[in-house]
Image: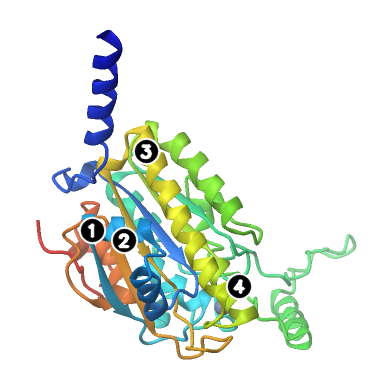
Amino acid sequence: MFGRSRLLFAILVLASATAFKPATPPRQRSAILISWDGALREHVNDCLKRNQMPNLAQLTQEGRMVDIDVSGHTTDTKAGHAQMLTGYDSNLTGVSSNTRFQPIPRGYSIFERLQESFGKKGIATIMVTGKAMGLGPGAPRISAEAETPSPLSDEPSDEDGRQARRAEKIRLAGEQNVSGQPFYLVKGSLTAWDGDRPRDASKVGQKVLALIDKFGPKGRFFLFVHFGDADVAGHKYGEASREYNDALVSLDAWLGRIVVELKTDGFYDHTAIYLTADHGFDVGTTHHNNATHIFLASNDPLLISAGEQKDVVPTVLQAMGVDISKIAPVLPGKSLRQKE
Ligand SMILES: [Zn+2]
């Protein structure tokens, strides 16, 4: 009998951990924002119709999936993630495409907004990526040459001359990374960063499971994870290929693994999951030049409205209990959640 009651207890514990509880006060929630690089909305919807994405189906059964569109910037990795993770247009982030970018200014990222609201000790901010290039934290590649003051002279250093020589080197090299990659200034503010090399979902996913185990017991966390697999397959084989479809299906399996980890650890009831993409894919091609169709899916049932990519940040911040009306500069987007 003892064995049976223990079994019953285990079943009850699991059952209580099987759903996100929207009644959790926003300031007690954790959140995971997942980016499926290059996931075209229509293709994802087709996968759902073919029952190839059981985990996304389950997530949206608890919550919802809404259409969002990319507007106002190039549909590529750098510009998409800069907007997804700041809520700003490229005039404020300085990131307008993979080749025209600068470091996102300090304080503008969703990670820093959360720290500002709850304190660095009040929430762990974590970023894991599968692509070093598009979400890079790299410093400028060409630095101004080191100062070498002549021992015979105490003349002030020739700053203008050094800058001019640097500008010439940049011009000659055709260098695009003039002042640093988009996440150059963001990286240092994070509690944990893991994203300096390209890698597939199996590597990225394992990192995420380990990070959930590490930070979940410590309190609130906001974890951003980027999976590059669908984009890589799309560029190589095309949007209509089996490989692109397989990549998306494998990302759904990783969504499932993440949910199971949260449930097993007992964090799922207070962890909202948001799933989106940086850009879609041009139908039947190997590129995403005009790929504005993406989505936002969540286990959060208060997610109700369709919108735009710039709405992701206000949506997530509001779900976490941040007063988005106090943010400066004013966020151009809006929360897609029903008021609670
Ligand atoms: Zn791409």
Q: Nearer the viewer, mark 2 or mark 4?
A: 2
**Amino acid type for the residue under numbered disc 3:** Lys
> Which quadrant of the structure image shows residue 307?
bottom left
In which quadrant of the rendered image does the N terminus lie? top left
Residue 154 visible (yes or no): yes
Q: Which residue is mark 4?
A: 232
**Amino acid type for the residue under numbered disc 4:** Val
Observer-nearest of 219 and 180: 219
Q: CA distance from mark 1 to mark 4?
A: 29 Å
Residue 88 visible (yes or no): no
Please state if 265 lies on the left or on the right of 169 as rendered. left
Please state if 122 lies on the left or on the right of 223 as rendered. left
**Amino acid type for the residue under numbered disc 1:** Gln
Q: Are marks 2 and 1 in contact (CB under 8 Å)?
A: yes
Q: Nearer the viewer, mark 4 or mark 3?
A: 4
Q: Indicate if the residue with disc 4 has its beta carbon within 8 Å of ligand 1.
A: yes
Q: CA distance from mark 4 to mark 3?
A: 36 Å
**Figure quadrant, ligand 1:** bottom right
The x, y position of residue 207, in whole percent, is 55, 46
**Amino acid type for the residue under numbered disc 2:** Ala
